[in-house]
Image (spheres, rainbow, N blue to C red):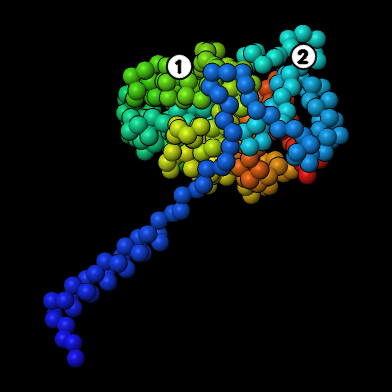
Amino acid sequence: MTTISKTHTFQFLIGCCAFLVFSCVEAQKPKPVPVPDLYYPPNESTVWDEIPLAELGWNQTALAEMLAWLPTQDTRAFIILKDGKIVVEEYWGSKLTGVGGMDQNSLWYWASAGKTLTAALVGIAQQEKLLSTNDRTQKFLGQGWTSMPNNQERNIRLIHQLTFTTGLDDKVANLDDPSPANLKYLAKPGARWSYHNAPYTLLEKVVENASGKNYQTYFKEKLGDKIGMKGFWQKTGFNNVFYSDARSFARFGLLLLAKGHWNGNTIWSGDFFDKMSQSSQNLNLSYGYLTWLNGKSSYMVPGSQIVIPGSLIPKAPTDMYQAIGKNGQFMMVVPSQNLVIVRMGSSGGDSPVPYVLMREIWERFVKVLP
């Protein structure tokens, strides 16, 4: 009979324990989310591969009807990407004035759709360890960036600006004005959701102070130039508004769809970007990090504290998320279908989030899809 020494037995037991612990740790590791197999247009070229409609099995009659309807809503540019390739790219003039037609090179404002772009830049700054969403805003803007006493002001963190939960008073005369006198206490941070532009706008100054670079330079170096976006930030009143051509809007949507990857390069990765398109708080489930979400059980709209039951865009896929701006600046990402849809133009009503127009688009687009 073979005799096993106590030392060998002990070593064997230690090895088994180590194996079990390692196995448990490995089992608990979240599996990496696969990156979709996508086409990426060249950065320095007008070349962009297309998919013939016949290959998709889409209803071409319904698509033609939708494309005929879109300019009646003062749509100037409309792009649909499938798997990164162009399915639809159309441009129109204004039906209201008969002039002002857009084309592939025309620049147009993103309005509040630029918020999602700002969220991405904050995430990149965190990836570079220049800031953390848990940092106090005071760290980058200094004490006194609001008119509140220090014991209240110090409770506001970057995460509250990203999720519209700063608690700052939204009953002021100008919601865009970021001056300290206009930033007053109303509620504890995290306790109230309000579409308040001023604290959002200050995130640009946060990124500038954290990086030591102006906002346009940081955008170009860390994101824009890396994916071939043509655009610029321009001060308009109190806001800093992004302008680009429609294809650049679509490029940003494709980057989101690709989870931060671009033609073999990683522009971003990490937990921040996973959370961008998830409910960021329990107040407005349809809001992530400066990004609107579909398919949630309820939503809130700017200027109201009412929680409305149901999905923001009932006809659209539940996994869709959107950058939305005034007058119908839309960039919609649908991961389950590898779709990116861009709409630029006017109309859409006076609301900073014209979701009614987006609903009308999807009521027509669902008839197009197989």
Q: Position of residue 295 (x, y in %)?
A: 64, 46
Question: Circle 2: is it few (<14), some (14-19), or many (20+) Cα within 10 Å?
Answer: some
**Residue 117 in the image: x percent, y percent?**
52, 27
294 and 246: which is toward the camera: 246
Q: In which image quadrant can residue 283 be found? A: top right
Whether residue 57 sits left or right of residue 234 in the image: it is right
Q: Residue at x 64, y 13 (%)?
A: 105
Q: Residue at x 83, y 35 (%)?
A: 60
Outermost residue, bottom side: 1
Q: Which residue is mark 1?
A: 216
In the displayed orientation, state which residue is furthest to the front. Answer: 1
Residue 172 visible in this rendered orientation of the protein: no
Secondary structure found at label 2: loop
| Sequence-wise first label, 2 or 1 | 2
108, 12: nearer the viewer: 12
- Tell me the amino acid under the disc marked 1: Gln
- Give the class, few, some or many, for how many residues have Cα within 10 Å of label 1's Cα (few <14, many ≥20): some
Q: Residue 94 has which mark? A: 2
Left or right, 110 with respect to 93, comes to left
Q: CA distance from mark 2 to mark 1?
A: 30 Å
Residue type for callout 2 = Ser
| Residue 354 image-quadrant placement | top right
Residue 90 in sight from this viewpoint:
yes
Residue shown at 27%/70% (left/top)? 17
* Placement of the C terminus among the 4 image quadrants: top right
Q: Relative to residue 293, is residue 96 depicted above or below?
A: above
Does residue 327 sit above or below 265 in this rendering?
Answer: above
